């Protein structure tokens, strides 16, 4: 992985830049500018911790207007900016740069409004995902997207990466549950997209911002839809003798017209690691495990419970255990949500990959990953959202062992190439960041990338927002961000210019 070369002139002006940023805030305003090398170490990486870089400095604003002042200043002085929520990104999306200011949003931690009549919550971008559900639980509501890191990840970060979670099969990703955002552009303009209504007229700018990985602006406020808790929710643990039979069960359930609230799959290494860590009651004799959650009216859940068990046994399941209480259901899910730290006990380091494939390709892809594991001599544990084909292979390695990191990177790249090869995509919810940046050409043509970069240039013509992420080659924006130069030529030069 190569990041853009740092601007030595900017680094030399570090103290001057930090002082200028401090001067943006009045004496009565609570804002911090961090320059101490020791304190900066807390910001030098995100969840993709194999890569580290100390930022130029960190600004911790607590109002949208303060964010606007910082961006306005950075825009005027051509200083790079990286936005950071909770730092749980698993693709290097919040990885700082040596010549960039990190805008930390940890002080944006308030829920501003709970509107049960319209079934929405308005929260600052630093509010954690789980906090939204906890805030409305007393009235029987919840926020559906639930990443495994929901206890820590911020709602603003969820918007940046279009995060999912174990319940995204039935209830959708972040983009399906966000109604509005407040956004600060690189030149300090504060804009609102969407609101409390279901849809807005005109271009879908809200959809454009969701999943844009901090390349187009900094989100400071988010309006999300909340849902009523279902009358009944049950989770079933279904053990299989092979991963192929578990994959066949996934396809059969969906093919039968059943859409579970969640359908997760784990292979043998992940099952054993998780059970030793959480003691969730997982079947240790299974080669693959499905967790299938059904929710809705009691009579519907009772019927679907039997149908799912019947389908599972028809494709070779050797055990079916259904939760008999809410505590047991939560324990089943606690194991799944703790799978990543559980696997962390098996090796000094691991990469958590993220790719999505057609469900029918699950058996083939799992077999190929096993072959890759043997080829690279690195272990892999599989935990993924089986219902929508979103894979999360955990590649285990030891960064202190010479060559291991490089092998893990190439192993991960081969998995992602395989995902694209079978008709899938590079990412399901973690984003591109720096991890998948240089693989974008595997999925997109040069024309595709040109069009994506035109959007980037329209919002950020100087490429100051989160540079070095997503795009494998940085092009210079011209004509006020409407297009860019590639190989010294304007694309589509034969067409009239606006």
Image (cartoon, rainbow, N blue to C red):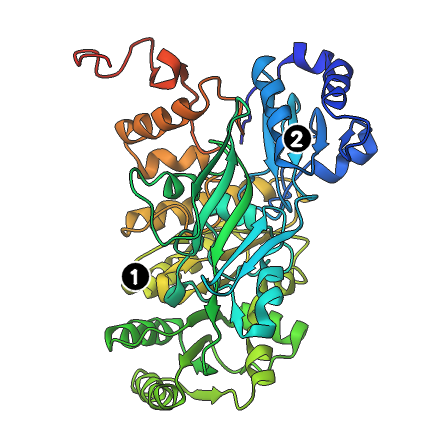
Q: Assess disc 1: are there few (<14), some (14-19) or many (≥20) residues with their C-alpha within 10 Å of its C-alpha.
A: some
Residue 214 visible from this viewpoint: yes
Q: Is residue 13 above or below residue 244?
A: above
Q: Assess disc 2: are there few (<14), some (14-19) or many (≥20) residues with their C-alpha within 10 Å of its C-alpha.
A: some
Q: Is residue 314 left or right of residue 392?
A: left
Residue in front for this viewpoint, 452 or 248 = 452
Residue 497 locus on image (x, y percent): 23, 12
Kindly identify which numbered label has been placed on residue 361: 1
Q: Disc 1 and disc 2: Cα gap in Å?
A: 49 Å
Q: Is residue 451 above or below residue 227?
A: above
Assign a secondary structure to mark 2: helix
Residue 347 locus on image (x, y percent): 65, 57
Q: Is residue 429 above or below residue 227?
A: above
Residue 338 visible from this viewpoint: no
Residue 35 locus on image (x, y percent): 79, 26
Assign a secondary structure to mark 1: helix
Residue 476 locus on image (x, y percent): 41, 15
Residue at 48% over, 17% down: 462
Residue in front for this viewpoint, 381 or 14 = 14
Identify the image quadrant of the C terminus: top left
- The residue that mark 2 highlights is 66
Kindly identify which numbered label has been placed on residue 468: none
Residue at 43% over, 28% down: 472
Numbered-mark total: 2
Q: Is residue 219 left or right of residue 459?
A: right
Q: Earlier in the sequence, mark 1 or mark 2?
A: 2
Which mark is in front, 1 or 2?
A: 2
């Amino acid at each position: 992985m190569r990041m853009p070369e740092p601007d030595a002139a900017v680094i030399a002006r570090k103290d001057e830049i930090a002082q200028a940023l401090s001067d943006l805030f009045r004496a009565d305003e609570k804002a911090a500018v961090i320059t101490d090398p020791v304190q900066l170490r807390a910001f030098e990486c995100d969840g993709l911790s194999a890569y580290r870089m100390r930022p130029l400095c960190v600004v911790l604003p607590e109002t949208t207007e303060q964010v606007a002042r910082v961006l306005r200043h950075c825009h005027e002085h051509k200083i790079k900016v990286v936005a950071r929520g909770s730092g749980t990104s698993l693709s290097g999306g919040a990885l700082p740069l040596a010549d960039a200011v990190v805008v930390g949003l940890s002080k944006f931690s308030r829920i501003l409004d709970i509107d049960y009549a319209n079934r929405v919550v308005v929260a600052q971008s630093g509010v954690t995902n789980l906090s939204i559900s906890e805030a409305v639980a007393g009235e029987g509501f919840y926020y559906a997207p639930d990443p495994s890191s929901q206890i820590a990840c911020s709602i603003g970060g969820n918007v940046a990466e279009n995060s999912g979670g174990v319940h995204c099969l039935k209830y959708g990703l972040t983009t399906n549950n966000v109604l509005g955002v407040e956004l600060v552009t690189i030149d300090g303009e504060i804009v609102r997209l969407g609101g409390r209504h279901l849809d807005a007229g005109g271009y879908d700018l809200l959809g454009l911002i969701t999943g844009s990985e901090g390349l187009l602006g900094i989100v400071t406020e988010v309006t999300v839809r909340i849902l009523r808790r279902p009358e009944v929710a049950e989770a079933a643990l279904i053990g299989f003798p092979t991963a192929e039979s578990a994959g066949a069960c996934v396809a059969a359930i969906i093919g039968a017209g059943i859409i579970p609230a969640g359908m997760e799959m784990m292979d043998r290494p992940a099952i054993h690691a998780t059970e030793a860590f959480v003691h969730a009651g997982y079947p240790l004799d299974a080669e693959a495990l499905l967790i299938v959650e059904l929710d809705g009216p009691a009579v519907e859940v009772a019927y679907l419970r039997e149908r799912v068990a019947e389908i599972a046994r028809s494709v070779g399941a050797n055990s079916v255990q259904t939760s008999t209480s809410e505590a047991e259901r939560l324990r089943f899910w606690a194991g799944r949500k703790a799978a990543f730290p559980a696997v962390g006990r098996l090796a000094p380091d691991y990469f958590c990959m993220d790719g999505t494939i057609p469900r029918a390709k699950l058996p083939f892809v799992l077999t190929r990953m096993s072959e890759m594991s043997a080829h690279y001599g690195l272990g892999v544990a599989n935990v993924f959202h089986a219902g929508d084909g979103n894979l999360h292979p955990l590649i285990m390695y030891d960064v202190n062992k010479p060559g291991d990191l490089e092998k893990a990177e190439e192993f991960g790249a081969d998995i992602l190439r395989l995902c694209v090869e079978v008709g899938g995509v590079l990412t399901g919810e973690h984003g591109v960041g720096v991890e998948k940046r240089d693989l974008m050409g595997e999925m997109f043509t040069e024309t595709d990338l040109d069009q994506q970069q035109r959007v980037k240039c329209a919002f950020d013509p100087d490429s100051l927002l989160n540079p070095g992420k997503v795009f494998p080659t940085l092009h210079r924006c011209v004509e006020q961000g409407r297009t860019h130069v590639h190989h010294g030529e304007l694309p589509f030069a034969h067409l009239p210019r606006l």
